[in-house]
Amino acid sequence: MDKKPATAKAFTDEEKWEIKENGKYILTAMDTIGKNGDAYCTDESLFRVSKTVRPDLTKQQFYTDKSLLLQAAFLHQEGCHLYAQRTWEYEVTAAEQLADILKDPALPVMEIPKELCAGDILLSEQQRKAIGLALNSRLAVILGGAGSGKTTIIEAIVHCFRGSVDSSEAYVLAAPTGKAARNLTERTGIEARTVHGALGKVPDANFLDAVCWIRTGLVVVDEASMVSLEMLAGILNRVRRNCRVVLLGDPNQLLSVGAGNVLSDLLKLGVPSIFLAQQYRQSAAAAALRQNVAAFPKLSDERELQWDDSFRLLSADSKIIPDLLCEEAARRYRAGESIQVLSPVKTKTDFSVQALNTRLQNEVNPLTAEKQTWGAFRDGDRVIVTQNNSYYNICNGDVGVLYIRGEKPHRVATLAVRGTLKTWQIDCMEKYGVANDDAPPPRLALAYALTVHKSQGSQYDTILMPVSTATAKMLYRNLLYTAISRARKEVILVGSREAVNTAMQCIPYPRKSKLVARTNLLRLRRSAGGGDTVGRRLGKSSIDVNNFDKKKVFHINVKNFT
């Protein structure tokens, strides 16, 4: 069976539509692979994922549909590696822009005041250095663990920029998610947007359109561990030559929902960077928690963790983990404490998010004859918003309390979130599918327990989390770190030290991307005076990136920040 790349050919719009529809299961599978972090895959892995979408699929049908998708430019093949066409274009463009930036990374020097404040906070010497790096580089990365003052630095960077350039110079402040962008706005007092919003994302939008931020002199992106290849390419493709692009993030937190390993790749390429070592989030009273969060990237196993009242383990066999965890969590929820139960798994175990939410709802907010309900929700339930909703000004990940009042057909739901009330007519929505002037109601789920991914970017006084060897494949190092770093005062792990050690030893498989190799090869060609065969045309490339060994070309001495 022929697995070689098919030659591209012209199709009518109708023919392309038919090819896309027939191969939709392959494109869906490729999208799943991309969301899991890989920029490319092999025939074998794509076929395997495609079978989950279309169980009756034969290899003959798969290769036939794949060949047509290649010819119609919905897929791109490079050696034995398959890309979604758009993902390949993003990787090529990002590599091209990075090669240009790294050839000449500096900008004219912008002086930084010796004494610099963000609000009423006097910045440290290390923070001043980070700001100087950001404002004097075309591309800079500022790294720091949870609570290391990255948000404070963002505020100072923007204020220094405003005070040092012409008033016509614009800036962009962004974050990968709506919740992160909103939090950034609230903490800095400076308006922030999502990366997609800043880039003008609409359905099927191409971030590689010939659009330039002509007046923009500064782009700052927070939570850069969640920045995907798509976001990076979109930003670098928009900015002009003398614009400053600054990425701030924690390299040890969970990665993007999307292809690429951007933060790690930029460090491998030698992009100017600085690491913020000091911790500010955890109080000095929470000694073990503070020490564990700060030292976690360097710890090899659970024996090196510090244990006290701020960081402790409730030892339990897997069978009794739910009982012990729910007892402790329910007591604290009823007392009104700032806590959050986190779980590494969504379903299928007794300590999954689904199972824990059911148990905690019954224990914290039991159903009574007087209590109003709406589907699975009860009056007084703790809930999370699962989709951005501009009408109600709420974001995916917002946690609040749901109140249900009135009698059919006039029941009213009110969501108390972030100190404001959002109200809609339940029965009107159920009858007509809409509520409040045809606006869609918020999408909600119970939030007594959340996945660690949903908690990223949030802070709580106390975190409770089950740790069991029964879910070892879902426990890995950056997930555990992300969970414990959400806590300001206390972490309670329920399970076994063996499971904690398993998590600390488990590093996720490297994501499949050729960004580093592609960028270094372009740098080599340009340093040798060769032309750019890739460029913005995104045509057929003579670059054999598959056989390129970056170690033979550039030896990049990157400090190990992880």
Image (cartoon, grey):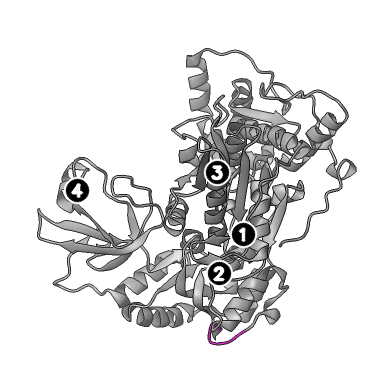
Q: Which residue is mark 3?
A: 32
Q: Residue 481 magenta-drawn? A: no
**3 or 4: tag closer to the N-terminus:** 3
Q: Amino acid at mark 2?
A: Ser
**Magenta highlight range:** 307-312
**1 or 2: tag closer to the N-terminus:** 1
Residue at 71% of width from left, 73% of height from top?
299
**1 or 3: tag closer to the N-terminus:** 3
Q: Residues within 10 Å of mark 4 (few under 14, many from 20)?
A: few
Q: Which residue is mark 1?
A: 250
Q: Amino acid at mark 1?
A: Asp
Cα–Cα span, label 4 and label 2: 40 Å
Q: Which residue is mark 2?
A: 485
Q: Secondary structure at mark 1?
A: loop
Q: Residues within 10 Å of mark 2 (few under 14, many from 20)?
A: many
Q: Which residue is mark 4?
A: 430
Q: Amino acid at mark 4?
A: Glu
